[in-house]
Amino acid sequence: MNPDEIFKNVVSHAKEYGFVFPSSEIYDGLGAVYDYGPYGSELKNNLRRYWWIAMTQLNENIVGIDAAIFMHPTTWKASGHVDAFSDPLIDNKDSKKRYRADVLLEDHLAKIQGKIDKEVEKAAKRFGESFDPEMYASTNPRVLGYREEIQKVEDRMKAALESGNLEDLQQLIVDCEIVCPVSGSRNWTEVRQFNLMFGTEMGATADGATTVYLRPETAQGIFVNFLNVQKTARMKIPFGIAQTGKAFRNEIVARQFIFRMREFEQMEMQFFVRPGTEMEWYQHWKEARMKWHLALGLGADKYKFHDHLKLAHYANAAADIEFKFPFGFKELEGIHSRTDFDLGKHEEFSGKKLRYFDPELNESYIPYVVETSIGLDRLFLAVLSTAYQVETLADGSTREVLKFPAPIAPVKVAVLPLVNKDGLPEKAREIFELLRFDVNAQIDSKESIGKRYRRQDAIGTPLCVTVDHDSLVDGMVTVRDRDTMEQERIPISELRGRVLAKVEMRNLFR
Ligand code: GAP
């Protein structure tokens, strides 16, 4: 299966087995908004818990909070979101379709790159084994011409975006002869900045109402609570504040399932440090976060760092941890050294001091901040798309299986009476009652045992326990492993310990 097919299968599997549904589907859905079903919400809870334990429970100097989604509107003025959290948009007058100007230009550049790739491919076929693609690309006049064209467009686009010159951005689209993919025309409007925050009214009357925003990131709830937390939890620098919660962005180009959504969940941690030590902590958190990802066991080849060359105005270092999704390497998490920008701005706009008295230095200062920020939905997609596998078995049949790391699987164990009679369902229920207080367990007696195994494979249950007629006599059950499909007979008295050893979260932290 090629990556496109795998991705399509993952999306339909997610719906068919109760992981992810389009929002309000009976009304044909709502763009880039999704609901999590019974197994999806379990998986999401487990991933959130994996992050929360790693951040708070396992770091003595990090505490958690749960701030409100609504915040005082000045928060977003201070943070820069009101003025600068926007995308440059352009409309085609014929199709009435709206596009991100920078995305239209990037798609145009990708097309030119495609021409280069084709030239190199053709030459490779012509020259055979001795062919050196790099040498060819750096000497062939046609390829050099394409490369020059790309460079020119990139330079102009970067200059226009950085200086906010929207007229030149529009002129660049015209000069590149970019056509609307729907109407095929070049009949473009001017480019306008479009703020990505969702606004709404708070208050009873139209006159007295205030515009408030649905938060576009959870981080600001941490910044404005910096002193509350530092004082009440008696934290000493360096220390961190962690939070998980919903964030909202009116994304214009929202595609790729739950990768880019308009309502999504972030897991963010702001680490407050002494000014001048931020680069050490930035390195520390880059390494610590990568280690956390690798511990999930999805494969080291799935991750890479992407260091930002162009930094946001408030950052002095930034990197993404990228994950190999079915549609290529894309950002999963960001690690940012945000200096004292946010606390400094909130101090300026609120008129309240947001400083820390450092007893070792005997002075007060605005701490510097290193942030780690990961999208829970993107993590979910990374895990789901890697776990999804279609296997051909020895008898030639196929099975769809979700090979989740056992501690984050939605259902940990299924108890299955071999037949639905002869006292087996009663014995199975006894065993189910033994397990359900520790882990999310299922009991299932419908259809053949083979079909029940397949169903548990399809939702990623690591262990199935089969109760047969012998179990009533010898007190033993058969435990089937999802990945190897091997079966082992063990005493019921050992079952609880066996299940817990397989699925406990601490396995990931070892
Ligand atoms: N506080 C920093 C911040 O919000 P960001 O790079 O804009 O930084 C952090 O977002 C993470 O949130 C991203 O790495 C991504 O995982 C997730 N994220 C951002 N926008 C998203 C969207 N529209 N849908 C799903 N996840 C998103």
Image (cartoon, helix red, strand yellow):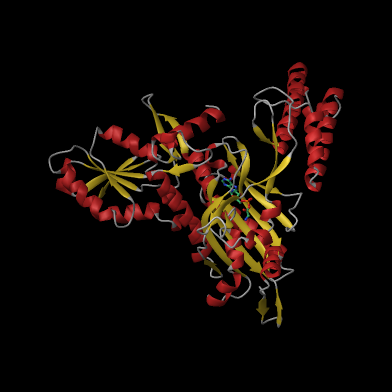
Residue 289: quadrant of the picture: bottom right
Viewer can see residue 153: yes
Return the x and y of residue 214 as percentages of the image width and height: 56, 54
Residue 182: quadrant of the picture: top right
Q: Nearer the viewer, residue 155 or 80?
A: 80
Height in image: 435 above or below 143?
below
Return the x and y of residue 375 as percentages of the image width and height: 56, 50
Return the x and y of residue 132 as percentages of the image width and height: 79, 27
Height in image: 78 above or below 114?
below
Q: Is residue 228 left or right of residue 412?
A: right
Q: Nearer the viewer, residue 380 or 280?
A: 380
The residue lying at 34 percent from left, 36 percent from top is 455
Q: Is residue 90 left or right of residue 57?
A: right
Q: Is residue 87 left or right of residue 418?
A: right
The residue lying at 31 percent from left, 49 percent from top is 441
Viewer can see residue 157: no
The residue lying at 75 percent from left, 24 percent from top is 115
Return the x and y of residue 458 as percentages of the image width and height: 38, 37
**Total numbered labels placed on residues in the image:** 0
Height in image: 210 above or below 9?
below
Q: Which residue appears farthest toward the left when viewing the image?
A: 422
Q: Which residue appears farthest toward the top when viewing the image?
A: 126
